[in-house]
Image (cartoon, rainbow, N blue to C red):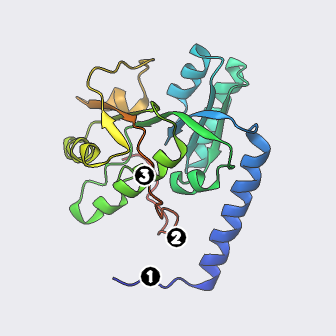
Protein backbone atom coordinates (compact mmCIF):
# COMPACT_ATOMS: atom_id res chain seq x y z
CA UNK A 1 0.00 0.00 0.00
CA UNK A 2 1.42 3.39 -0.99
CA UNK A 3 1.79 6.41 1.21
CA UNK A 4 -1.19 8.71 1.70
CA UNK A 5 -0.91 11.98 -0.25
CA UNK A 6 -1.48 14.96 2.06
CA UNK A 7 -2.27 18.52 1.09
CA UNK A 8 0.68 20.93 1.48
CA UNK A 9 -1.31 23.08 3.91
CA UNK A 10 -1.93 20.10 6.17
CA UNK A 11 1.73 19.09 6.12
CA UNK A 12 2.75 22.67 6.89
CA UNK A 13 0.50 22.72 9.96
CA UNK A 14 1.90 19.37 11.11
CA UNK A 15 5.48 20.61 10.70
CA UNK A 16 4.73 23.82 12.61
CA UNK A 17 3.01 21.95 15.43
CA UNK A 18 5.86 19.48 15.82
CA UNK A 19 8.46 22.26 15.82
CA UNK A 20 6.52 24.09 18.55
CA UNK A 21 6.30 20.89 20.61
CA UNK A 22 10.06 20.29 20.32
CA UNK A 23 10.75 23.85 21.45
CA UNK A 24 8.35 23.53 24.39
CA UNK A 25 9.90 20.25 25.52
CA UNK A 26 13.43 21.59 25.20
CA UNK A 27 12.45 24.39 27.60
CA UNK A 28 10.41 22.24 29.98
CA UNK A 29 12.63 19.19 30.43
CA UNK A 30 15.99 19.28 32.19
CA UNK A 31 18.84 17.56 30.30
CA UNK A 32 19.02 13.80 30.83
CA UNK A 33 15.68 13.81 32.64
CA UNK A 34 13.95 10.49 33.33
CA UNK A 35 10.18 10.80 32.97
CA UNK A 36 7.10 9.19 34.35
CA UNK A 37 4.85 9.53 31.30
CA UNK A 38 1.08 9.14 31.24
CA UNK A 39 -0.36 8.68 27.77
CA UNK A 40 -3.82 10.23 27.65
CA UNK A 41 -3.82 11.88 31.07
CA UNK A 42 -7.49 12.90 30.93
CA UNK A 43 -8.49 15.25 33.77
CA UNK A 44 -5.24 14.62 35.63
CA UNK A 45 -6.73 12.66 38.53
CA UNK A 46 -4.13 9.92 38.43
CA UNK A 47 -0.97 11.83 37.57
CA UNK A 48 -1.51 14.63 40.10
CA UNK A 49 -1.92 12.10 42.89
CA UNK A 50 1.03 10.11 41.60
CA UNK A 51 3.26 13.20 41.59
CA UNK A 52 2.14 13.95 45.16
CA UNK A 53 2.98 10.42 46.27
CA UNK A 54 6.39 10.43 44.55
CA UNK A 55 7.78 13.99 44.73
CA UNK A 56 11.22 12.90 43.50
CA UNK A 57 9.75 11.70 40.18
CA UNK A 58 9.30 14.03 37.22
CA UNK A 59 5.83 13.41 35.76
CA UNK A 60 4.45 14.45 32.39
CA UNK A 61 0.97 13.77 31.05
CA UNK A 62 -0.22 14.34 27.50
CA UNK A 63 -3.72 14.64 26.11
CA UNK A 64 -5.19 16.09 22.94
CA UNK A 65 -8.21 17.82 24.51
CA UNK A 66 -7.54 21.31 25.83
CA UNK A 67 -10.37 21.30 28.40
CA UNK A 68 -8.94 18.18 30.04
CA UNK A 69 -5.52 19.81 30.23
CA UNK A 70 -6.96 22.95 31.79
CA UNK A 71 -8.65 20.86 34.48
CA UNK A 72 -5.44 18.90 35.03
CA UNK A 73 -3.40 22.07 35.43
CA UNK A 74 -5.81 23.43 38.04
CA UNK A 75 -5.53 20.22 40.08
CA UNK A 76 -1.74 20.41 39.91
CA UNK A 77 -1.68 24.06 40.90
CA UNK A 78 -4.01 23.51 43.85
CA UNK A 79 -1.65 20.77 45.04
CA UNK A 80 1.35 23.07 44.61
CA UNK A 81 3.28 20.55 42.53
CA UNK A 82 6.45 21.41 40.63
CA UNK A 83 7.16 17.85 39.44
CA UNK A 84 3.98 17.44 37.36
CA UNK A 85 3.32 18.87 33.91
CA UNK A 86 0.59 18.52 31.28
CA UNK A 87 0.98 19.11 27.56
CA UNK A 88 -1.36 19.09 24.58
CA UNK A 89 0.21 16.55 22.27
CA UNK A 90 -0.50 13.39 20.36
CA UNK A 91 1.45 10.55 21.99
CA UNK A 92 3.48 9.58 18.92
CA UNK A 93 4.50 13.16 18.25
CA UNK A 94 5.42 13.72 21.89
CA UNK A 95 7.70 10.70 21.86
CA UNK A 96 9.38 11.79 18.64
CA UNK A 97 9.85 15.34 19.98
CA UNK A 98 11.59 14.36 23.23
CA UNK A 99 15.09 15.86 23.55
CA UNK A 100 17.89 13.38 22.93
CA UNK A 101 18.95 12.91 26.56
CA UNK A 102 15.46 12.35 27.98
CA UNK A 103 14.45 8.79 28.90
CA UNK A 104 11.32 7.05 30.16
CA UNK A 105 11.44 5.54 33.64
CA UNK A 106 7.73 4.58 33.78
CA UNK A 107 4.96 4.56 31.18
CA UNK A 108 1.25 4.61 32.01
CA UNK A 109 -1.59 3.91 29.57
CA UNK A 110 -4.82 3.93 31.55
CA UNK A 111 -8.00 3.30 29.58
CA UNK A 112 -6.72 4.47 26.18
CA UNK A 113 -9.30 4.71 23.40
CA UNK A 114 -10.02 1.07 22.40
CA UNK A 115 -11.23 1.93 18.88
CA UNK A 116 -13.64 -1.03 19.15
CA UNK A 117 -14.57 -1.39 15.47
CA UNK A 118 -12.25 -3.78 13.67
CA UNK A 119 -11.53 -1.39 10.83
CA UNK A 120 -10.32 1.16 13.41
CA UNK A 121 -7.96 -1.17 15.32
CA UNK A 122 -5.03 0.36 13.44
CA UNK A 123 -5.62 3.55 15.43
CA UNK A 124 -4.97 1.92 18.81
CA UNK A 125 -1.91 3.40 20.47
CA UNK A 126 -0.41 0.18 21.85
CA UNK A 127 0.82 -1.53 18.71
CA UNK A 128 4.15 -3.06 17.72
CA UNK A 129 5.66 0.04 16.12
CA UNK A 130 4.77 2.27 19.06
CA UNK A 131 6.03 -0.26 21.60
CA UNK A 132 9.33 -0.45 19.72
CA UNK A 133 9.54 3.34 19.78
CA UNK A 134 8.89 3.31 23.52
CA UNK A 135 11.63 0.73 23.94
CA UNK A 136 14.05 3.05 22.17
CA UNK A 137 13.52 5.60 24.97
CA UNK A 138 13.23 3.23 27.92
CA UNK A 139 16.08 1.62 29.80
CA UNK A 140 16.15 -2.01 30.86
CA UNK A 141 13.61 -2.62 33.61
CA UNK A 142 11.30 0.28 32.68
CA UNK A 143 7.70 -0.75 33.39
CA UNK A 144 4.72 -0.11 31.14
CA UNK A 145 1.41 -0.13 33.00
CA UNK A 146 -1.69 -0.80 30.89
CA UNK A 147 -5.32 -0.93 32.01
CA UNK A 148 -8.49 -1.12 29.92
CA UNK A 149 -12.15 -2.02 30.22
CA UNK A 150 -12.17 -3.36 26.66
CA UNK A 151 -11.56 -7.12 26.63
CA UNK A 152 -10.55 -7.26 22.97
CA UNK A 153 -7.95 -4.52 23.35
CA UNK A 154 -6.51 -6.16 26.46
CA UNK A 155 -6.28 -9.55 24.72
CA UNK A 156 -4.55 -8.01 21.70
CA UNK A 157 -1.89 -6.27 23.81
CA UNK A 158 -1.40 -9.32 26.05
CA UNK A 159 -0.83 -11.46 22.93
CA UNK A 160 1.45 -8.89 21.27
CA UNK A 161 3.93 -8.36 24.13
CA UNK A 162 5.34 -11.94 24.06
CA UNK A 163 6.02 -11.55 20.34
CA UNK A 164 8.36 -8.61 20.98
CA UNK A 165 11.95 -9.01 22.11
CA UNK A 166 12.05 -5.58 23.73
CA UNK A 167 9.26 -6.19 26.26
CA UNK A 168 8.15 -9.05 28.51
CA UNK A 169 5.03 -9.53 30.58
CA UNK A 170 5.47 -9.56 34.36
CA UNK A 171 2.33 -11.02 35.97
CA UNK A 172 3.86 -10.63 39.44
CA UNK A 173 4.62 -6.91 39.12
CA UNK A 174 2.80 -4.63 41.53
CA UNK A 175 1.36 -1.19 40.77
CA UNK A 176 3.12 1.56 42.73
CA UNK A 177 -0.12 3.53 43.08
CA UNK A 178 -3.80 2.69 42.78
CA UNK A 179 -5.96 5.76 42.15
CA UNK A 180 -9.32 5.62 40.40
CA UNK A 181 -9.56 7.57 37.16
CA UNK A 182 -12.76 8.92 35.59
CA UNK A 183 -12.87 6.08 33.08
CA UNK A 184 -12.11 3.50 35.77
CA UNK A 185 -14.99 4.78 37.88
CA UNK A 186 -17.34 4.30 34.93
CA UNK A 187 -16.07 0.82 34.02
CA UNK A 188 -18.05 -2.18 35.32
CA UNK A 189 -14.84 -4.23 35.04
CA UNK A 190 -11.29 -3.81 33.74
CA UNK A 191 -8.06 -5.73 33.13
CA UNK A 192 -4.47 -4.73 33.83
CA UNK A 193 -0.98 -5.82 32.84
CA UNK A 194 2.60 -4.74 33.37
CA UNK A 195 5.26 -5.12 30.66
CA UNK A 196 8.95 -4.72 31.47
CA UNK A 197 11.61 -3.42 29.10
CA UNK A 198 14.19 -6.08 28.34
CA UNK A 199 17.83 -5.54 27.40
CA UNK A 200 17.21 -6.31 23.72
CA UNK A 201 18.04 -3.36 21.43
CA UNK A 202 15.01 -1.59 19.99
CA UNK A 203 14.65 -1.51 16.24
CA UNK A 204 13.96 1.81 14.49
CA UNK A 205 10.24 2.43 14.20
CA UNK A 206 8.35 4.99 12.09
CA UNK A 207 5.63 6.41 14.32
CA UNK A 208 5.18 10.00 13.23
CA UNK A 209 3.62 9.85 9.78
CA UNK A 210 0.72 12.34 9.61
CA UNK A 211 -2.58 10.84 10.68
CA UNK A 212 -6.18 12.06 10.45
CA UNK A 213 -7.29 14.14 13.44
CA UNK A 214 -8.16 11.78 16.34
CA UNK A 215 -11.64 11.45 17.73
CA UNK A 216 -12.27 13.69 20.73
CA UNK A 217 -14.77 13.69 23.57
CA UNK A 218 -15.79 10.93 25.99
CA UNK A 219 -16.01 7.44 24.60
Q: Position of residue 106 (x, y in %)?
A: 50, 31
Q: Residue furthest front?
A: 200
Name the residue nearer the viewer: 157 or 62. Answer: 157
Q: Is residue 196 left or right of residue 71?
A: left
Q: CA distance from mark 2 to mark 3?
A: 18 Å
Q: Which residue is mark 1?
A: 4
Q: Nearer the viewer, mark 2 or mark 3?
A: 3
Give the residue displayed 63% in from the left and 33% down from the top: 34
**Residue 109 relative to residue 85: left or right:** left
Secondary structure under the numbered disc 2 in the rendered image = loop
Q: Position of residue 134 (x, y in %)?
A: 48, 47
- 84 and 31: which one is in front? 31
Tell me which corner region of the image, top left, top right, bottom left or bottom right, holds residue 81. top right
Q: In front here: 115 or 21? A: 21
Q: Which residue is mark 3?
A: 132
Residue lying at 25% horizontally and 53% vertically, measured from the top left: 116
On the image, the x and y values in percent for residue 85 come to 67, 34
Q: Is residue 195 above or below residue 161?
A: above
Would you call the spot at circle 3 few (<14 residues within 10 Å), some (14-19), or many (20 or more)?
Answer: many
Label 3 or label 1, whichever lies nearer to me, is 3
- Asked if 190 appears above or below 54 in the picture, the reply is below
Dot 1 or dot 2, earlier in sequence: 1
Compare marks 3 and 1 and give the one earlier in the sequence: 1
**Of all residues shown, which one is farthest toward the top?**
53
CA separation in Å, label 1 and label 2: 9 Å
Residue 210: mark in rendering: 2
Q: Is residue 155 visible?
A: yes
Amino acid sequence: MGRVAYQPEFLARITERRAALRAELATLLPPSQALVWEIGSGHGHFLVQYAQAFPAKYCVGVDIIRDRLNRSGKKRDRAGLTNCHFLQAEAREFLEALPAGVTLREIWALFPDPWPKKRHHKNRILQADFLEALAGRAGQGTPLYFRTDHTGYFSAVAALIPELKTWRLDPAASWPLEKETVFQARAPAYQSLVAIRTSHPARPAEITAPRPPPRVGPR
